[in-house]
Amino acid sequence: MSETVLELRSVSRTFSLSQGMFRRKATLTAVASVSLKVQRGEVYALVGESGSGKSTLAKMLLGLLPPSSGEILINGTPIAATDRIAVARRIQPIFQDPYSSLNPRKSIAQLIALPLVVHGIGTSAERQKKVAEMLDVVGLPRRLLDASPSQLSGGQRQRVAIARALVMRPEVVICDEPTSALDVSVQAQILNLLLELKREFGLTYFFISHNLAVVEHLADRVAVMYLGRFVEERTRAGLFAGPQHPYTRALLESVLTPDPDLGVPDTHLGAVFPNPLTPVAGCAFHPRCPAATDICRTTAPPLVHLADGWAACHHAPGLAAQSAA
């Protein structure tokens, strides 16, 4: 039986934004009543356009932002009732940009050892030994221990960031676009390294990305986020074979192909992202949805349960038949 290591229960996060001296503040809902369960040892991927709320959700998982409502649990224990240091031992991040996530004033050895120092783990000699071992694990030579981040390439810096995240042996690693700032050739190396480390250390990944090719390569389950809400959650195979929500279909159709005759794909979603400060009635996606009907404009969609997950769409069963035709 699978074990739930990370769980969100109706988690929301709102922000109050100033609109000027003579106007009342506006409320921005960055994450709206999101629920999910991540099983131990799996790669749970989250995809969506920029501005959909993915990074805000990641910050809440890391304890950097408290949820406005709802509950986040790790191993069944609410994070809000857990010491922040204890949460950090269990959940560690790998950020998007290795050029800005590493302190340029510190050596590679100091950067990797920093979590051990903060948590008071081991003596100085024991920390040095662990740091050297982690360099071996991520495929970097030990001669780089005294180097600074400016002396490393982007791929090497991201390996340092991975070593820093894993030196504490966390249970869950939050990967927030960990390859998007790297060259394509280096991306594949980092992704393969992440998979190797997952197998070696029994890690659980919460993987945030807008690159669907990366998600298809890595993920076990995939959630699709739109304007702070999950619109579909499926197994990787099920979602890529037969997406049930129009937004998921549009994301998959937006992927560039190497065939020059196909040109640039048209998702038919328009070029303008909706304003999250002015939410619409009914389904949040209906202003951009080519399949929207009157019920989509007035009534929030129900969760349609599928064999491998669910989709929040009035027309999800019809989409399944349409995909099979």
Image (spheres, grey):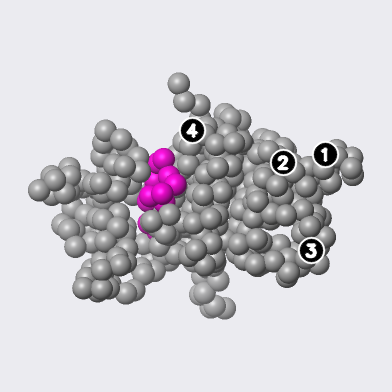
Q: Where is residue 224 in the image (x, y as percent from the top left)?
A: 37, 51
- Judging by the rendered image, the residue that carries numbered circle 1 is 121
Spatial CA distance of label 4 from label 1 is 28 Å
Kind of residue at badge 4: Gln
Residue 291 found in image quarter: bottom left
Q: Tell which of 64 and 167 is nearer to you.
A: 167
Amino acid on which the number 3 mark rests in the picture: Ala
Horizontally, residue 103 falls left or right of residue 100, namely right
Q: Can residue 229 be seen in this view?
A: no
Tell me which label, 2 or 4, sits earlier in the chain.
Answer: 4
Q: Is mark 2 on a helix, strand or loop?
A: loop
88 in relation to 264, above or below: above
Front: mark 1 or 3: 3
Q: Dividing the picture into quarters, in which one does residue 106 lie?
A: bottom right
Disc 1 packing (10 Å; few <14; some 14–19; many ≥20): few
Spatial CA distance of label 2 from label 4 is 20 Å
For this rendering, which residue is in front, 124 or 306? 124
Disc 1 to disc 2: CB gap under 8 Å: yes
Callouts 4 and 3 close, C-beta under 8 Å:
no
Instruction: Kindly identify which numbered label has been placed on residue 147.
Output: 3
In the rendered image, the quadrant that contains the N terminus is: top left
Other-residue count near label 3 (Cα within 10 Å), few / some / many at <14 / 14–19 / ≥20: some
Q: Which residue is drawn at 53% across and 55% down?
A: 189
- Secondary structure beneath dot 1 equals loop
| Residue that carries the numbered disc 4 in the rendered image | 39
